[in-house]
Image (tube, grey):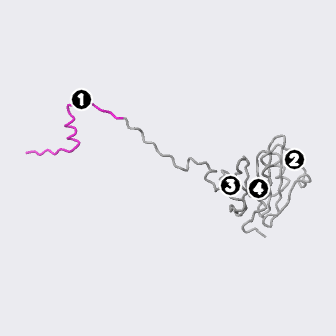
Amino acid sequence: MMKIVYTIPMIALLVSCGREDVETYQVPKEQKAAPEMQAQTPVERSAPVASPSAPQSSAGFTAELPEGWKEVSSSSAMRKVSYGIEGTDIDFYLISLSMGDVPSNVNRWRGQVGLPNATPAEIEKDLQIFTAGGHEVKFIEIYNEEGGKGIVAAIIDLAPSYWYFTGKGTVQELKAHASDMRTYLESIKFEGHNH
């Protein structure tokens, strides 16, 4: 005698035989949740805004960030650090190079804002010189009033390299924040370079 073993799917098949109604169902496609970090911009993931008295450390130095400044990420590998200044489109950043000829750099910046070259004597007259962490800082404000663009920059000799702090933006925004840039530069203490 043969023994038949029925499994649950087989029983369901046998029971449903002879029925003519077929039911269909719509099942919504499963949505994948987006990762939380995708919703944020690079600026939102950056360090919080610091008070003027809080020293900030980055790229081998510390400095006091003015109110409304914060360190932001940069897509440029040349930059040691970049800052966003609240309420402005100013791009303020630091790069380090092995050359430090002041007239050549100033005339390059002048060209970037649509101004003609200046003589070394004219450039010397426009330079503001002060110290930061025991090092001489050559600070200059370059404004093209007609074109509306400007650059505020500083060159610091940290032999064998030179550090360039450069702020680019509109004349109006740069003039409003140039004193904060200078205050920031004056507060710098270089790791391993202070005198």
The residue stretch that appears in magenta: 1-25
Do the residues under discs 4 and 2 have CB atoms within 8 angstroms? Answer: no
Position in image of residue 7 (x %, y %) = 20, 45
Q: Tell me which amino acid carries mark 3.
A: Lys
Q: Secondary structure at mark 3?
A: strand
Q: Which residue is mark 1?
A: 20
Q: Secondary structure at mark 1?
A: loop
Q: Tell me which amino acid carries mark 4.
A: Phe
Q: Residues within 10 Å of mark 4 (few under 14, many from 20)?
A: many
Q: Tell me which amino acid carries mark 1.
A: Glu
Q: Secondary structure at mark 4?
A: strand
Q: Residues within 10 Å of mark 2 (few under 14, many from 20)?
A: some
Q: Nearer the viewer, mark 3 or mark 1?
A: 3
Q: Residues within 10 Å of mark 1 (few under 14, many from 20)?
A: few
Position in image of residue 177 (x %, y %) = 78, 51
The answer to whether residue 158 is left or right of residue 1 is right
**3D distance between C-alphas at marks 1 and 4:** 80 Å
Mark 2 or mark 3, earlier in chain = 3
Q: Which residue is mark 4?
A: 165
Is 14 included in the stretch rendered in magenta? yes
Q: Nearer the viewer, mark 2 or mark 3?
A: 3
Q: Tell me which amino acid carries mark 2.
A: Asn
Mark 2 or mark 1, earlier in chain = 1
Whether residue 194 is situated above or below residue 180 in the rendered picture:
below
Q: Nearer the viewer, residue 49 or 81?
A: 49
**3D distance between C-alphas at marks 3 and 4:** 15 Å
**3D distance between C-alphas at marks 3 and 1:** 70 Å
Q: Nearer the viewer, mark 3 or mark 4?
A: 3
Quadrant where the C terminus sits is bottom right
Q: Which residue is mark 3?
A: 70
